[in-house]
Amino acid sequence: MGAGANNDDNIVSHSASVRTISGSSELAPVLIGWGVFMTYLVVQCMAHQAFVSQVAVDLWDSIAWACREWGVWIVMTPVLLRSVRKALRSETKAPYLIVCLGCLVLALGLRVTVDVIETAEQPLASLIYFSPKHLGAWVAVMVAGWWLSSGKTTAAEERGFAMPAQPARSTRTLLVSKGRDECLIELEQVDSFSASKNYVEIRCGGQSYLLRSTLKELEAMLPPGVFVRTHRSHIVRIRAIDRVRMLPSGTGIVTLHDGSTVGISKKHYKTLDQYRCTRSGRSAQD
């Protein structure tokens, strides 16, 4: 048990470091892009002062102008990238998408407020003028976040998880929470996994435990052919199934040996149907 616990601790700590590295790799190129863009604006402003307005070139005034125009997005970009990454990995995407939309509203609102204070412009006119620019910046950061999170982050995680040596045993353990305590449970004894916001609820031996993870991340770690997804929020052990009851709507209910139940969606019924589970809990394929 000591060796298993050490291995699980290594996997957990390595997973956290991979997420940290992948988050940094997403943020760096976007912030570099903003830095290049801001530098271009400063140079453009100085050129305008020298050749168009024909006044003394003021570096600090040029920097202040660039920051006034787009500085808020340098602050918003890390928040947006983090929200996009979490939305892609989470079962519940709405909260993160609301944060992304809130960044746009806040950035645009701040710029309009500054413009109204400085120029006494009508708020509606200022809003109409700045909306296309800030909407474009928001879309650009969102697309960059999506591309970096769905592509390079996945590759980084695959490389990272290949690094730690896997235990030479058929069973693995999970470090889970039970109230204020933590304990190790054997993966082969787990009956079901259910998504619960930023956690996964685990049914094992008639007890419920919590694991800080998403169902998608956990599913990638499960041995093939042992568990089956019945719903976007539920994964069950095939041999833990006691009975399956389909409803007229095309959905259904899976009852496990411990008496707990989980739902079946139309999308995942065909996958479950191939096992033809009966009351004995044995598959027709066995």
Image (cartoon, grey):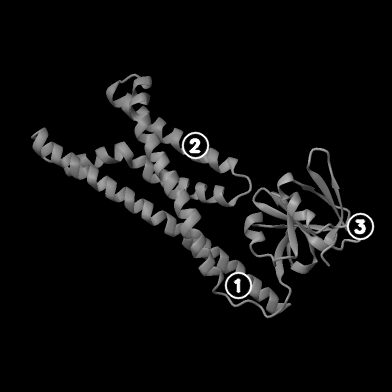
Residue at position x 29%, y 41% in the image: 67
Q: Quadrant of the C terminus?
A: bottom right
Coordinates of residue 95 in the picture (x, y in percent): 58, 41
Cβ–Cβ under 8 Å for marks 1 and 2: no
Cβ–Cβ under 8 Å for marks 1 and 3: no
Measure how far apart labels 1 and 3 are at the Cα level: 40 Å
Of the numbered discs 1 and 2, the one sitting upstream in the chain is 1
Residue under numbered circle 2 = 101
Coordinates of residue 219 in the picture (x, y in percent): 66, 60
Q: Three-letter amino acid code at disc 2?
A: Leu
Q: Nearer the viewer, mark 1 or mark 2?
A: 2
Residue at position x 87%, y 61% in the image: 281
Q: In this view, does 195 lie to the left or right of 247?
A: left
Q: In which quarter of the image is residue 239?
A: bottom right
Residue under numbered circle 1 = 10
**Can you see residue 152?**
yes
Q: Three-letter amino acid code at disc 3?
A: Arg
Q: In which quarter of the image is the N terminus?
A: bottom right
Q: In which quarter of the image is residue 68?
A: top left
Q: Residue furthest right?
A: 279
Q: Three-letter amino acid code at disc 1?
A: Asn
Of the numbered discs 3 and 2, the one sitting upstream in the chain is 2
**Can you see residue 214?**
no
- Residue 279: assigned label: 3
Circle 1 SS class: helix
In terms of depth relative to the viewer, which is nearer, 222 or 273?
273
Residue at position x 37%, y 25% in the image: 127
**Circle 3 crowding by C-alpha within 10 Å: few under 14, some 14–19, many from 20:** few
